[in-house]
Image (tube, rainbow, N blue to C red):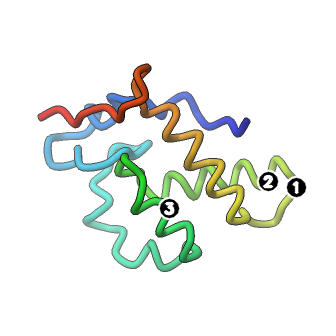
């Protein structure tokens, strides 16, 4: 099973100010303000997988996790299967015990 940082948690967006709580980001930034075009760096199936996720996972933070996992497997860059495994691991950390995504709190 792929391991990701413990910083991924159901309430992680609460570290951000109110405007920055739209997504799950390790640095609690308002990525929508600085990440224009970032999705273009990811393979199309990975972009689709992120879009289909019940969570709004930051693509930059997910990419960092995938690069770390790939390096641990002695790969030069993440494969699509590595990206998918990382997204799955992040989703597990962000999902409540009953299997439902955590609701965003206002």
On the rendered structure, is 50 left or right of 12? right
On the rendered structure, is 2 left or right of 52? right
- Mark 2–mark 3 contact, CB under 8 Å? no
Q: What's the residue at 27%, 55% (across, down)?
A: 30
Q: Secondary structure at mark 3?
A: helix
Q: CA distance from mark 1 to mark 2?
A: 5 Å
Question: Quick one: label 1 or label 3, which is nearer the N terminus?
Answer: 3
Q: What's the residue at 25%, 39% (across, down)?
A: 16
Q: Secondary structure at mark 2?
A: helix
The N terminus - image quarter: top right
Nearer to us: label 2 or label 3? 3
Q: CA distance from mark 2 to mark 3?
A: 22 Å
Question: Quick one: label 2 or label 3, which is nearer the N terminus?
Answer: 3
Q: CA distance from mark 1 to mark 3?
A: 24 Å
Q: What's the residue at 55%, 66% (across, down)?
A: 46
Asked if residue 36 is positioned above or below residue 31 in the image, the reply reads below
**Residue hosting label 1:** 74
- Circle 3: is it few (<14), some (14-19), or many (20+) Cα within 10 Å? few
**Residue hosting label 3:** 49
Residue 10: % across, % down:
37, 29
Q: What's the residue at 32%, 59% (across, down)?
A: 31
Q: Secondary structure at mark 1?
A: loop
- Circle 1: is it few (<14), some (14-19), or many (20+) Cα within 10 Å? few
- Mark 1–mark 3 contact, CB under 8 Å? no
On the rendered structure, is 15 left or right of 89? left
- Mark 1–mark 2 contact, CB under 8 Å? yes
Task: Single out the residue that lies furthest toward the right.
Answer: 74
Residue 74: % across, % down:
88, 55
**Residue hosting label 2:** 71
| Residue situated in front as seen by the camera: 75 or 89 | 89
- Circle 2: is it few (<14), some (14-19), or many (20+) Cα within 10 Å? few
């Amino acid at each position: 099973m792929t391991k990701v940082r413990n910083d991924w948690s159901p309430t992680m967006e609460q570290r951000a100010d109110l405007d920055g709580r739209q997504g799950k980001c390790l640095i609690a930034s308002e990525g929508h303000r600085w990440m224009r075009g970032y999705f273009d760096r990811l393979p199309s199936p990975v972009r689709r997988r992120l879009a289909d996720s019940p969570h709004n996972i930051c693509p930059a933070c997910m990419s960092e996790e995938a690069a770390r996992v790939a390096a641990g497997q002695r790969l030069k860059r993440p494969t699509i299967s590595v990206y998918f495994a990382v997204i799955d691991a992040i989703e597990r950390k962000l999902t409540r015990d009953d299997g439902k995504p955590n609701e965003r709190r206002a």
